[in-house]
Image (cartoon, rainbow, N blue to C red):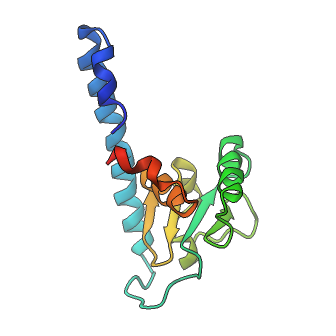
Amino acid sequence: ECFPPLLPCLPRAARSNAAALYSRSMERPLRARAQLRMEAGEGLDLGRKSPLFDEQLNLLYDSKCSVCRWEVDTLTSLGATGKIIFTDIESTSFDPSSAENGGVSYEAAMASMTAVTRDGEVLVGVPVFEALYRQGGVGWGFAGGR
């Protein structure tokens, strides 16, 4: 993980506060991921044998967010077209109940970076970036963080 190695750079008094803040910040995505998996399982056939789509991932992104658009542009420039579906949650055609969208609501997709694998698994937070950049050919950048 990225943050703990930086702790020695902080003054001793700040280390415990920084570590506590980091731990709490990491709990939220894990709870959100569990909640999204539970929501995604409602009404969907997660025992399906065939993939939901030909690409490896479906990234749910907000086209009104400049950082999200930058991610999509970067991934496209890395050759992710044909490997990743880019689904704009701001589009009037976005259907949260679609299996391809993992049953993820607009609100849940806005809360954290979210993607759906071709097998229907909903990824939230850092695992999304790992999977996205693996498809873009630069997944090695995440290898040291695990």
Viewer-nearest residue: 114 or 131: 131
Query: Residue at point 38% right, 50% down?
Result: 143
Q: Is residue 82 above or below residue 124?
A: below
Q: Is residue 7 above or below residue 112?
A: above
Look at 37% across and 67% down and name the residue there. 38
Residue 124 placed where, x, y %? Answer: 45, 55
Q: Nearer the viewer, residue 14 or 7?
A: 7
Residue 80 locus on image (x, y percent) = 64, 64
Q: Where is the N terminus found, in terms of image quarters?
A: top left
| In this picture, residue 9 sits left or right of residue 94 | left
Is 125 left, or right, of 30 in this rendering? right
Residue at image coords 32%, 13%: 10
- Residue 87 on image: x %, y %: 66, 65
Residue located farthest toward the bottom when viewing the structure as drawn: 49
Q: Position of residue 136 (x, y in %)?
A: 58, 60
Figure check: 8 above or below 105: above
Q: Is residue 97 visible?
A: no
Visible residue check, residue 70: yes
